[in-house]
């Protein structure tokens, strides 16, 4: 008599990930049928859905108990995305704090973003006919030639 190997039960995590993947594909198909204006208006929802999808499918973040709970919902992707979107919606005080943090650390930002003054310098030097990013590349090349005496 041949022994059969008992199959292990599928974990709640795997079931949840499979359901979220199916719901994500359905969501994506629906979004691809919409016009640009509607897509623009739905950008926060689309972002929330994509972030939840990536986090739950590609991350090692789900626990069995949490997954079992979320499987009670027909569309756990929507449940999580709605919660994530609501969590991330900034109120004016959060934005005020963010602006204050950026201003307080102004010297850090100037290394990462072009200032108006520097953009004006580039326009004065290269004119308005050349795009500002092309003028910046010319400036970098010029600096490199000076440093390496090319």
Image: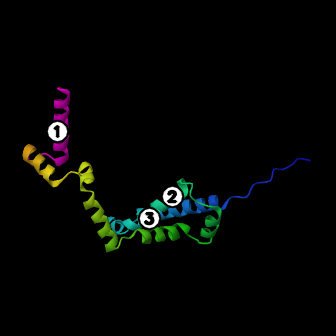
Image colouring: rainbow
Q: Residue furthest right?
A: 1
Residue at 16%, 31% (x, y): give it: 146
Q: In terms of secondary structure, where does tag 1 sit?
A: helix
Dot 1 and dot 2 residues touching (CB under 8 Å): no
Q: What element does badge 2 sit on?
A: helix
Secondary structure beneath dot 3 equals helix
- 47 over 83 or under it: above or below: above
Assess whether mark 1 and mark 3 are in contact (beta carbons under 8 angstroms): no
Q: Which residue is mark 2?
A: 55
Gap between marks 3 and 1 measured at Cα:
39 Å
In this view, the residue in front, 57 or 103, is: 103
Question: Which range is magenta?
Answer: 127-150
Work out whether 54 lies above or below 3: below
Relative image position of residue 138 (x, y in whole percent)? 17, 39
Judge whether 104 appears above or below 83 on screen: above
Residue occupied by mark 1: 138
Marks 1/2: CA distance? 41 Å
Q: Is residue 138 in sight in this rendering?
A: yes
The CA distance from mark 2 to mark 3 is 11 Å
Please give left or right for residue 74 compared with residue 140 in the image.
right
Q: Residue at x 63, y 58 (%)?
A: 14
Q: Give the labeled residue for mark 3.
A: 48
């Amino acid at each position: 008599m041949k022994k059969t190997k008992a199959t292990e039960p599928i974990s709640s995590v795997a079931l949840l990930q499979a359901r979220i993947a199916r719901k994500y594909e359905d969501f994506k198909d629906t979004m691809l049928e919409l016009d640009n204006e509607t897509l623009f208006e739905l950008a926060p929802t689309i972002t929330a859905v994509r972030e939840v999808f990536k986090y739950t499918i590609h991350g090692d973040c789900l626990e069995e108990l949490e997954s079992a709970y979320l499987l009670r919902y027909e569309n756990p992707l929507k449940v999580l995305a709605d919660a994530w979107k609501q969590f991330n919606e900034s109120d004016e005080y959060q934005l005020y704090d963010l602006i204050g943090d950026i201003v307080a650390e102004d010297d850090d930002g100037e290394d990462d973003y072009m200032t108006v003054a520097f953009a004006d310098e580039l326009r004065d030097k290269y004119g308005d006919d050349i795009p500002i990013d092309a003028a910046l590349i010319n400036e970098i090349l010029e600096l490199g030639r000076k440093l390496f005496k090319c």
